[in-house]
Image (tube, rainbow, N blue to C red):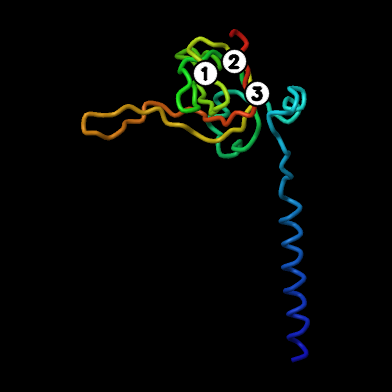
Amino acid sequence: MAKSKPIGIGVGVAILGLIIVYASSQTVDLKVNDSMSDSELAAASIDWNYYDLLKNIDELEGKIIHFTGTVNVASENGVFGINVGQSSIREDVIFVEYDKEEFVKRDMVEGYGYVKGIRNIERTNTVGGADILEQVPNIEAIKVSCTSC
């Protein structure tokens, strides 16, 4: 019996230590919203490029990015597509979820948003299923403004 007390206390201390390490490793979420100034959002955003975003989408999920581009897919159900850059083959596209304002093709927009994951661009095939044509980054917008409207 005397030996079981030190073992029980040791296990308890080890568990408490693991809880403290886990809690200290968690990042504190910033309360980010659309009432923040552009400079505050800029300070909270990360540097990114299109190909790193695609390759590391899981690690970047939840991070805030700044984006600028030209609308190439008009708003529908609160989602629109924008060209954010030009590669040697074709334009780099992201989809943005934003239901506070509608945008039309060729609008130039600028904004901030959370990396949400990947969105599949699909087309219906002849047997009624869907073929994935491309996978693009999906962003949940915090604030978007039209710079050419």
Q: Which mark is residue 82?
A: 1
- Upstream in sequence: badge 2 or badge 3: 3
User: Is residue 24 shown left or right of residue 84?
Assistant: right
- Upstream in sequence: badge 1 or badge 3: 3
**Furthest-top residue in this view:** 148
- Upstream in sequence: badge 1 or badge 2: 1
Q: Secondary structure at mark 2?
A: strand
For disc 2, the marked residue is 109
* Residue type at numbered disc 1: Ile
Of tags 1 and 2, the one toward the viewer is 2
Question: Cβ–Cβ below 8 Å for labels 1 and 2?
Answer: yes
User: Is residue 101 shown left or right of residue 17?
Assistant: left
User: Is residue 114 shown left or right of residue 120?
Assistant: right
* Residue type at numbered disc 2: Val
- Kindly report the distance in space between the C-alpha atoms of the residues bearing marks 2 and 3: 11 Å
Residue occupying image coordinates x 52% and y 19%: 102
Which quarter of the picture shows residue 69?
A: top right
- Kindly report the distance in space between the C-alpha atoms of the residues bearing marks 1 and 2: 8 Å
Pointer 3 local density, CA inside 10 Å: few below 14, some 14–19, many at least 20: many
User: Is residue 46 shown left or right of residue 77?
Assistant: right
* Residue type at numbered disc 3: His
